[in-house]
Amino acid sequence: MKPIFASPFVRIDYDQSDQIIEVKWLQQPPSSEFRRCIRLILDFALARNIFRFLFDVHKRNYLPLQDQNWLLQDIVPLFRNRKVRLAYIVGIKNIEMMDIFHLKDTVARYNTFQVELFFTKPEARQWLVHPVDIGV
């Protein structure tokens, strides 16, 4: 695992053997920090043709609507025509917020995006490398 970036809000690592970018939110980020980190991830991924992402969102309690819209309007289209897999590790609190389902359903409309929710990291990594329907 190779560290890419770390801050008080997030830790981003790259698993070169499985071609997975792992993002672990350490606390709820302000919108500006969230967007800055997503842009950093995007630049790293596109420069290296990496399209498997594991997001641990346990400590990111919610995603404000304006950031959801920004992701869907500005970021998701940059991955058109690429097979992208997004695995989210969630907790009960994330599921109760329901914002993750809105993103999952909207992004899934793009035929090239596969999005699944998991409770554990091993399940999420397994799906990213060998996708099957085992998510939440």
Image (spheres, rainbow, N blue to C red):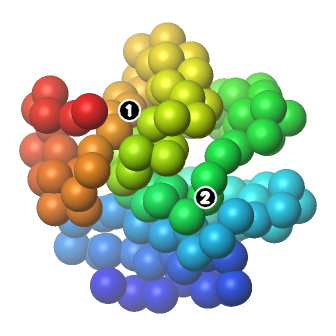
Distance in Å between CA atoms under marks 1 and 2: 18 Å
From the viewer's side, name the closer residue of 26 and 17.
26
The answer to whether 27 is drawn above or below residue 114 in the figure is below
Element type at mark 1: strand
Q: Which-is-in-front pick, marks 1 and 2? A: 2
Q: Residue at x 68, y 57 (%)?
A: 38
- Three-letter amino acid code at disc 2? Arg
Q: Position of residue 73 (x, y in %)?
A: 77, 27
Between residue 64 and residue 132, name the one nearer to us: 64
Q: Say which mark, if any, is on residue 48.
A: none
Residue under the image location 55 percent in, 29 percent down: 98
Q: Of the numbered discs in the image, which one, if any, rests on residue 115?
A: 1
Residue wearing tag 2: 60
In the rendered image, residue 130, in percent from the top left (x then y), is placed at 11, 44
Element at badge 2? loop
Residue placed at 73% from the left, 34% from the top? 68
Of the two numbered discs 1 and 2 on the same chain, state the one appearing first in sequence: 2
Q: Quick one: 44 or 25, which is closer to the camera?
A: 25
User: The residue under label 1 is which amino acid type?
Assistant: Val
Percent position (x, y) of residue 42? 63, 56
Please tell me how many numbered marks the rendered image carries. 2
Answer whether residue 44 is visible to the viewer in this image. Answer: no
Residue 112 seen by the camera: yes
Residue 19 lies, with reference to residue 8, above or below; the image says above
Q: Residue at x 78, y 40 (%)?
A: 64
Query: For mark 1, does the 10 Å Cα neighbourhood hold few (<14), some (14 to 19), or many (20 or more) residues?
Result: some
Tell me the quadrant of the picture where the N terminus can be found: bottom left
Q: List x then y, in percent, for residue 111.
A: 42, 15
24 with respect to 37 (left or right): left
Quadrant of the frame with the C terminus:
top left
Up the image or down, 1 lies above or below 16; here it is below
